[in-house]
Image (cartoon, coloured by chain):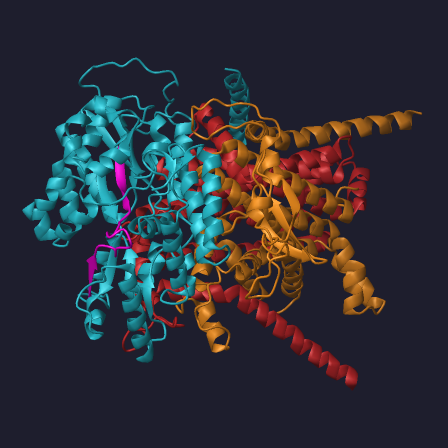
Amino acid sequence: MAGLKKLGELQKSEERLAYLLLLPTLFILVAIAIYPLATVFYNSLTDKKFASSQEVSFIGLRNYRELLSVTVKELPPVIDADTGEVQIDSETNQPVYERAINILPREPFRFRAMKQFNLFGKMYVIGATDREFVRAIGDTLAFTVVTVILETILGLGVALVVNANFKGRGVMRAVMLVPWAIPTAVSSRMWEWMFNSTRTGLVNVVFQNLGIGNGQIPFLVDTAWQIPAMITIDVWKTTPFMALLLLAGLQLIPKDLYEAADVDGAGMIRKFFTITLPLLRPTLAVALVFRTLDAIRVFDLFQIVLQNTRFSMASFAFYNLIDSQTMGYSSASSVVIFVLISVFAVFYIRLLGAEND
Amino acid sequence: MTKRITHIIGRIFFWFLVLLVAFYMLFPFYWAINSSFKTENQLQMTPATFLPRDQTTLEFAPTFQNYIAVFRNERFQHGLINSTIVAVSTTLLSLLIGSFAAFALGKLRFRGRTPSLYIILSMTMFPQVAVLTGLYAVIRVLGISAIPSMILSYLLFTLPFTAWVLTAFFQGLPDEIMQSAQVDGATPLQTFWLILLPLTAPALVTTGLLAFINAWNEYLFALTFTTIEVDARTVPVAIALFTGEISHQEPFGEIMAAAVVVTIPLLILVLIFQKRIMAGLTAGAVKG
Amino acid sequence: MKTNRILWTVASMMMAAAMVLTACGPAATEPPAATEAPMTEAPETEAPMEEITLRVFAGNVGQELELTKEAAGRYMVLHPEVNVEVVDTPDFVEDRLGVYLQLFEAQSPEGDVFQIDVIWPGDLAEHFVDLNEYGAADVAGDHFPAIIENNTVDGKLVGIPWFTDAGLLYYRTDLLEKYGYNAAPATWAELEEMARTIQEGERADGNEDFWGYVWQGNAYEGLTCDALEWVDSSGGGTIVSPEKLITVNNDAAIAAVEMAASWVGDISPDGVTGFGEEDARGVWQAGNAAFMRNWPYAYSLGQADDSVIKDKFDVSPLPAGDAGHGSATLGGWQLAVSRYSEHPAEAADLALFMASYDEQKARAIEGSFNPTVMSLYQDEDVLAATPFFGSLYDVFINAVARPSTATAPQYADTSRIFYNGVHSVLTGEVDAMTAFEEMELDLQDLLGYDVGQP
């Protein structure tokens, strides 16, 4: 009886200690962030203009509808008025279809054509009310998935290498930090220069020597090259972050586990899958969460290198806030980012079990 | 025999990959160094040269004018000091406060653990540009000066990071350590200070380093908060304010020189911390 | 009111946090800033000897900043009771505008005089005082009328012109001579023909990096400037007319942009659709282009001692299209006084001083800044220092303003619709007819104006 009671008390005091220890973190974060976060949510439901005395009205979910509405419409073929038959383009020998701009709805928001495609002999068009944002979502997600996968694989590789015992690994560890240490504002400019569309750009010079292109490939303008270029830069920039974090996780794995495995005669690969990976799982989960979070809200890289030509979701929010001063609309796009990050975060945590004890 | 050959081939392949990755990581930095020794005209040469070369004779001809300009720039020197103050304070604070939280989240049993984790994370899930205006309003009402403002606002992204990472590290430590310490009569706090922290020292250093660089490189908040407090500007802001002689002209060589100048001290810092990491490791090995 | 209370609650929480921080963190390095003035207007005390501080937000460029500081110094000598602080802001437009907007959103009294772009008076008018009420009406007539008109929003003079800019055609005199041309091209067709001939000739001579014509084709404000020049010189109007009619969608405009699109990959690099001012100048100054469209700043850089094109080029007005005249987009910067300033009268006096004849003359001589005071283009000292100014007078007086006042406060969006539309034609994503039809619809949605012909 008395023992149980004591255990209950212990439990209670442990709980009290936990709250006490958590308090500073929660207090600071909430105190700094609650007002800014609350205003973002609130503004996203209004038509507030930034730095303007214009009256603010509550417009419900209108901003979200304007940001996210997508539709698919069929484009009917054009019927020749004289013959009553489908018009055929004399050059391409293909039927002529109605122009998308005449078919897409204009009320209450105007839909703009994003892409046309042919399915079972019929022509369709995808329209979006804000095609820039819809495209930004797609681009940002593609960017996120590819960079996070590449960075995780490369980062884990680098971490395993520098965790091994060899001469000069101290220097190696410092050196591998270089990309992460250069301010993004500067490294983005550096890469922009390397991707220059003339032969002042390194990549064009190298490609030309390899027989690709004529030394004039506009990597940062050509839509096919833009996102791969962004991925190249980001993988370079953030692999060290991943590597260092995973390295820290590796260092916490007790050496005696490996020694015991050695005694059992386990090979490298088996040791990796039975010891390293399971014990690295919590660190991996956290690394993935923060890497994904940063990738989804990637900002400076897109803002500096691609500017207005193609947006990440965060640079979309930035340009709408500063150039157009549509604060409500920009806030709504930020909330979309928030929601997407939450989905990813919950997914990882469930998958890798960072939350269970 | 064949086993040995596959082993050797595997080794060669492995080191080839390592070299490839190292090349990918380092070559752009080499290119920055290369560019920092070029004049504007040399930068415009086609095709781009792998060393700074004279335009007509193509002889090796580096220029030091970019570095001279960077070292003459008082703003930049101030920026180095300011950035150091801000980044060091932010890092120490978030390590200290974050490790408390992480201890609770990683090793103690209490109700509301999962919600706490999510709340901490959710504070950092908005893009910076979205919270900037609200933060600026709060800071203006408080009337605090630029440097504390930056430290406070940087905690917004460094604190959740350190808290989460350290939680994962603490969780990774076997529970028996806690239990045996308790059996010995240590309070949870003593266990934390005397056992958990020393054991995770290398991980702490690494986490701190990542947080430090995050704070060191921040630009948007710093630009806004130091608008009128010119003397509090940090390195990224100072670099953004580099200009040519004339409007529109971009001093690319100087920016690259500045990149080299800010990266080298960080590398030295890391090399120094390496020793700490090693020391921590050996200490951990003794106890573990 | 309510937001304020919430703000205060949060603020006091943060104050507590700050105190906790300073207690356990390293010692704060700087004492908190002197308590700032309350938001409510402080009673204006007219004590003459009380020192006041005025903050000027200006460009950060090396020499430009120095000149501004010198001007501030001269003002302080004349007005010992005023202390002028020059605050530099980034050259990158979105960053500079962002800094300004944060101050305006907070209605901050911390900035008094602001250097603003020629396209901002309309959009930012509500944050600035009417300078006419502070004596600008007397001097406005000395400046280029087009700029004064641009800066006047609903009868209110938002900014006093400080220095101006306009698009120019740079051409290589040595190459024109080599290929038998004796004058700069007068029409776009001539330019195209000359550029092609020179490009083919130079490439045949072994310079595979040579291009005929470089300009600004990235999707940004610079493209609005370039495209406006093509369109207006072809008689296609100025996107939105001063009478507030949307005139963008017309055959002349479509033809003009199609002409430019045909240059890409032909006489202009494939990458020109990613070019800003500095990218174009990079190609030009390496000696790899026969023609360039740019602002006057490129002149002195091209004439620098280590420049390979020194004394091998000249400037002329941009070529004409079907309209029979060339068009140069008006650029440049103004000085405006914040409505939230605590000393608007003194600030306005400072702004007018900095934009006065003598000050603009000093800037013209020492920094080649193009004055907005017309008579300075006949000033002998100015002409002696910068001989090419004389020929610029005609360009400036005929410069075409972007429709920033007619579309206020929606100019930034108007421009974005325009440059994105033009950019999509240049890159071949969309055909010109569809792009212009969409621009028209977008502008109707945005502005609610009627559609008209230029």
Q: Quick one: B3 or A186, which is closer to the camera?
A: A186
Q: Quick one: B175 or C70, which is closer to the camera?
A: C70
Farthest residue to the bottom: give it: B1
* Drawing shade for chain B: red
Q: Residue at x 32, y 29 (%)?
A: C111
* Residue C160 locus on image (x, y percent): 23, 33
* Drawing shade for chain C: cyan
* Residue A10 locus on image (x, y percent): 81, 29
Assess whether residue C327 is covered by the magenta stretch.
yes
Q: Is residue A134 left or right of residue A200?
A: right
Could you tell me which quadrant the N terminus of chain B lies in?
Answer: bottom right
Q: Quick one: A246 or B118, which is closer to the camera?
A: B118
Farthest residue to the left: give it: C380
* Residue C179 locus on image (x, y percent): 22, 74
Residue C289 appears in the rendering = no
C196 shown above or below A341 = below
* Residue B159 locus on image (x, y percent): 59, 39
Q: Residue at x 62, y 43 (%)?
A: B161
Bounds of the magenta segment: C313-335
From the rendered image, report the letter of the chain displayed in orange: A
Q: Residue at x 77, y 27 (%)?
A: A13
